[in-house]
Image (spheres, grey):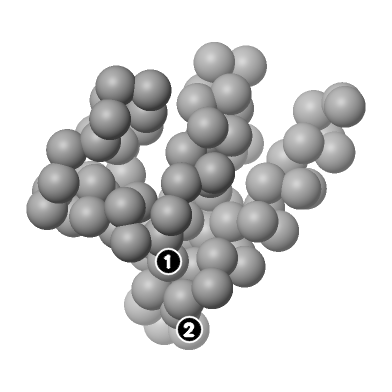
Amino acid sequence: MNRDTRLKRLQFRSWHRGTREADYLVGGYFDTRSANWGEDELAAFEVLIEEQDVDILAWAMSMAEPPSHISPALIADMRTLDYIDTSR
């Protein structure tokens, strides 16, 4: 699958998580950061997107630590929460 197809697929999955909170968190993060991602960051996000919303929210809000297969750099960046558009 080429990069553009991967990004479109990930964008859809990021904004259709199942809860509005997760949509804003994961979708907002994807929209803000994905344009600058290399292959490593893209692969790390593909791993993250397979996780449950409740877990991603807990990791991003520092309520829990992610398991070892989740990129610590990605979670650290998500914890900044500076990418969430609250005007929607």
The kind of secondary structure element at disc 1 is helix
Tell me if 20 is positioned left or right of 8 in this view: left
Residue at mark 1 to residue at mark 2: CA–CA distance? 14 Å
Q: Nearer the viewer, residue 58 or 10?
A: 58
Q: Which residue is mark 1?
A: 22
Which of the pair 37/60 is nearer the observer?
60
* Residue depicted at x 29% and y 22%: 68
Give residue 24's quadrant in the image: bottom left
Please tell me whether residue 18 is drawn above or below residue 63 in the rendered image: below
Asked if the residue at tag 2 contacts the one at tag 1, i.e. Cβ–Cβ closer than 8 Å, the answer is no
> Residue 33 location in percent, x, y?
50, 41
24 sits to left or right of 81: right
Residue 7 in percent (x, y) is at 73, 40
Q: How many marks?
A: 2
Mark before the other along the chain sequence, 1 or 2:
1
Percent across and percent down for residue 34 are 57, 38
Which amino acid type is marked by label 2? Arg
Q: Is residue 69 above or below residue 25?
A: above
Q: Image quarter for residue 67?
A: top left
Image position of 38 with respect to 80: above or below:
above
Q: Quadrant of the N terminus?
A: top right
Whether residue 85 appears in this view of the structure is: no
Relative image position of residue 49 (x, y in whole percent):
53, 45
Residue 52 visible in the snapshot = yes
Where residue 88 is drawn, which disc sits there? 2
Tell me which amino acid carries mark 1.
Answer: Ala
